[in-house]
Amino acid sequence: QVQLVESGGGLVQPGGSLRLSCAASGSISTIYVMGWYRQAPGSQRELVARIISGGNTYYADSVKDRFAVSRGNGKNTLYLQMNSLKPEDTAVYYCYFEYSGSYRAAAWGQGTQVTVSS
């Protein structure tokens, strides 16, 4: 079974930067989608950014030109570089993989808290 572990969250002032990491462990032969979601208190979980097989990326309008999603050289690692952070970026951030090992499946990380506040 694949497990995802996020790291890199924390408290940052408005205008600051953070880099989130997500590392996958377990048997993965192909990754179809890698993405970051976030959920703020009282809100639904929303897609922030993702990479699909082939390298195409997608960003939510609210983070375009501020966030950058990338895949690590080891291929089973995902990053989210967050710049020019705003208080409204405060949320728990989750990474998400769609992959195949013995069969096609999906996995979520446990989440990492990002708080943007002065």
Image (tube, helix red, strand yellow):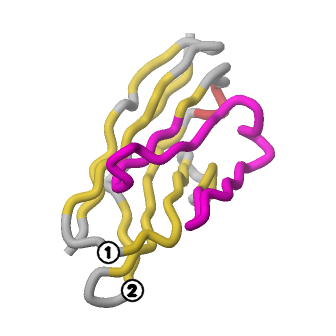
Structural crowding at the residue carrying mark 2, measured as other residues with C-alpha within 10 Å and reported as few (<14), some (14–19) or many (≥20): few
Q: Nearer the viewer, residue 14 or 29?
A: 29
Task: Give the residue displayed 64% in from the left and 34% down from the top.
Answer: 67
Is residue 54 magenta-colored? yes
User: Which residue type does callout 1 highlight?
Assistant: Ser
| Residue labelled with disc 1 | 29
Residue under the image location 54 percent in, 19 percent down = 17
Using the image, determine if residue 1 lies above or below residue 73: below
Badge 1 marks a residue whose secondary structure is: loop
Q: For residue 113, which quarter of the picture?
A: top left
Q: In the image, is 9 to the left or to the right of 83? A: left
Binning the other alpha carbons within 10 Å of mark 1 as few (below 14), some (14 to 19) or many (20 upward) gives few
Asked whether residue 46 appears in the rendered view, the answer is: no
Q: From what the image shows, is residue 98 above or below residue 69? A: below
Q: Residue at x 76, y 41 (%)?
A: 62
* Circles 2, 1 touching at the beta carbon (< 8 Å): no
Residue behind mark 2: 104
Quadrant position of the N terminus in the picture: bottom left
How far across and how far down the image is residue 35, in percent? 53, 57
Q: Is residue 86 magenta?
A: no
Quarter of the image with the C terminus in it:
top right
**Secondary element at tag 2:** strand
Instruction: Mark 2 vs mark 1: give the one in front.
Output: 1
Identify the mark nearer the N-term, 2 or 1: 1
Image height of 81 relative to 104, above or below = above
Q: Residue at x 43, y 47 (%)?
A: 78
Most extreme residue toward the right is: 61
Percent of width and height locating residue 64: 76, 39
Q: Which residues are magenta?
A: 51-80
Q: Nearest the camera: 42 or 33?
A: 33
Cα distance between the residues tagged 2 and 1: 10 Å
